[in-house]
Image: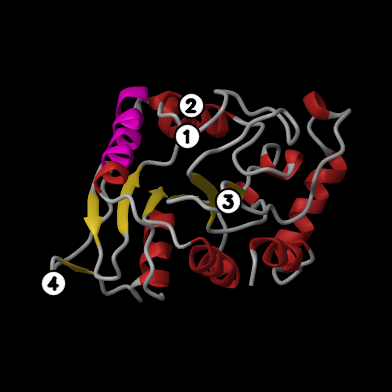
């Protein structure tokens, strides 16, 4: 399966009634600041370089961000923080991400999420996350990156369940893999897994995630790419 065919399948998904109702209601009512926008109001596909060696995984589209613009991490504060950091690290062509056709291009990185529809309160249910699992699993299988970056604990846990069935091994020894900002693991499947706090407004405005902390994550990604230039070739 190609990314194009996967996204064609994704765009017509109505598996989660609560999310379908919410994403479409938000798109109909709109926020006053965006009353002249035609909201996307559908599942949001991944975005970036299909030949990427890095895949970054967030939680879910924002109601008035990606659910409005139709592109991952575009049109809200989380996206502003993320793409500015990717620009500084050389992964993005520009530091801003306002709308689907603003000229932003990504190099060597693909941005996706655990859940593809905007959830009420930014909190998808466990079943809704599970319903979206095949889309993320197939993206990873198609792209075959070398490095996975988990933006938040939920993304971290979901990545582990997909690529290692929750039972990772480091350097051929059984060892626990726990979420912590800046933690870096090499899993038995060959993937590198890096952890970061999610660049949500809640984290960035409280100082839990600073520019310096976030830049260090992407600097580490660069270091790993320099050290391990080949994409992973073994099957999931």
Q: Quadrant of the C terminus?
A: bottom left
Label 4 or label 3, whichever comes before in sequence order: 3
Q: Are marks 4 and 3 in contact (CB under 8 Å)?
A: no
- For discs 2 and 3, the disc positioned in front in the rendered view: 2
Q: In the picture, residue 172 is in which quadrant?
A: bottom left
Q: In the rendered image, which quarter contains the N terminus?
A: bottom right
Mark 2 vs 4, N-terminal side: 2
**To which residue does mark 4 refer?**
172
Q: Is residue 166 above or below residue 99?
A: below
Range of magenta residues: 211-223
Magenta run includes residue 126: no
Q: Nearer the viewer, residue 53 or 81?
A: 53
Q: Residues within 10 Å of mark 4 (few under 14, many from 20)?
A: few
Name the side, left or right, on which 95 lies relative to 88. Answer: right
Predominant SS along the magenta part: helix
Mark 2 and mark 4: Cα distance apart in space? 35 Å
Callout 1: helix, strand or loop? loop
Give percent across and percent down for residue 216: 29, 31
Q: Position of residue 122 (x, y in %)?
A: 58, 48
Mark 4 or 1: in front is: 1
- Residue 177 figure quarter: bottom left
């Amino acid at each position: 399966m190609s990314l194009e065919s996967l996204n064609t399948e994704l765009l017509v998904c109505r598996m989660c009634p609560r999310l379908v109702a919410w994403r479409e209601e938000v798109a109909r009512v709109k926020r006053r600041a965006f009353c002249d926008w035609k909201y996307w109001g559908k599942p949001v596909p991944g975005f970036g370089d299909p030949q990427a060696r890095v895949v970054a995984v967030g939680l879910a589209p924002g109601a008035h961000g990606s659910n409005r613009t139709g592109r991952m991490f575009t049109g809200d504060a989380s996206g502003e923080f993320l793409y500015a950091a990717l620009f500084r690290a050389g992964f993005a062509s520009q530091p801003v991400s306002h709308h689907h056709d603003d000229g932003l291009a990504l190099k060597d990185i693909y941005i996706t999420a655990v859940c593809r529809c905007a959830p009420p309160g930014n909190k998808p249910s466990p079943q809704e996350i599970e319903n979206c699992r095949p889309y993320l699993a197939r993206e990873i299988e198609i792209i075959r990156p070398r490095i996975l970056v988990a933006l938040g604990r939920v993304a971290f846990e979901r990545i582990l369940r997909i690529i290692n069935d929750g039972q990772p091994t480091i350097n051929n020894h059984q060892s626990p893999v726990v979420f912590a900002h800046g933690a870096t693991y090499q899993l038995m499947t060959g993937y590198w897994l890096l952890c970061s706090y999610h660049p949500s407004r809640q984290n960035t405005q409280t100082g839990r995630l600073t520019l310096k902390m976030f830049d260090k994550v992407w600097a580490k990604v660069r270091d790993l790419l320099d050290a391990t230039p080949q994409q992973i070739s073994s099957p999931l």
